[in-house]
Amino acid sequence: MNSPVPFPFIDELAVKPEWLDPNGHMNVAFYLRAVDDGSNAFFDDVGLGWGYTAEGQGSVFVTSCNMDFRRELFAGNEIQVSTRLIDWSPKLIHTYSEVRHKAEGWVAATCESIYMHISFATRRGAPMPDSAQQRLAEVLRVHGGTPKPETLNRPLGIRRQP
């Protein structure tokens, strides 16, 4: 029997001084880095983490993401990155992550991502191992029964007032 499914998966990080830009706040690229590092708990749980990649059969690659930036983060801020599963198919994983200020709880950024399972033999999309698919089905049973995030599937564009 697998372990209980966390909702959401959470990892904690701190904003590093080298993540700052000349504006004195965390640079846009490092918000994505925080989401990437913070999603390790989720990918480890479903059997597709860096340990799986090191075995040499395959990995998951980001194919698309949509980030919203809400508040600035600064060097030394402790943050929590939450990851939840929105959907999956044998080759694809759809997640939603939030980067929160740990002490104050506000959302600094959100990120919706699509990952593709890649075979290292072909460097193309391929079905995930059965064990990962089984665990993803378990995770979706827990995560799928909760309200969807408000920015999920948000279109990107300039909103004009009539």
Image: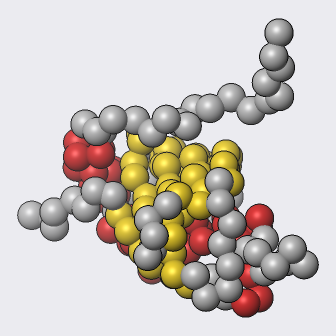
Q: Is the residue 96 above or below the residue 148 in the image?
A: below
Residue 160 point in image, percent of width and height: 83, 20
Name the residue: 66% across, 49% down: 68
Q: Extreme top residue here?
A: 162
Q: How was this image coloured?
A: secondary structure
Q: Is residue 49 visible?
A: no
Using the rendered view, name the quadrant where residue 86 is placed: top left
Depth check: 48 or 125 in front?
48
Which image quarter is the N terminus in?
bottom left
Name the residue: 38% across, 68% down: 10
Count how many numbered circles sit on residues in the image.
0
Name the residue: 73% across, 74% down: 26
Residue 69 point in image, percent of width and height: 68, 54
Depth check: 18 or 56 in front?
18
In this image, 159 relative to 148: left or right?
right
Using the rendered view, name the quadrant where residue 33 is placed: bottom right
Q: Extreme right residue here?
A: 22
Residue 76 point in image, percent of width and height: 61, 88
Name the residue: 55% across, 74% down: 37
In this image, 154 relative to 57: left or right?
right
Q: Is residue 145 visible?
A: yes
In this image, 15 relative to 10: left or right?
right
Which image quarter is the C terminus in?
top right
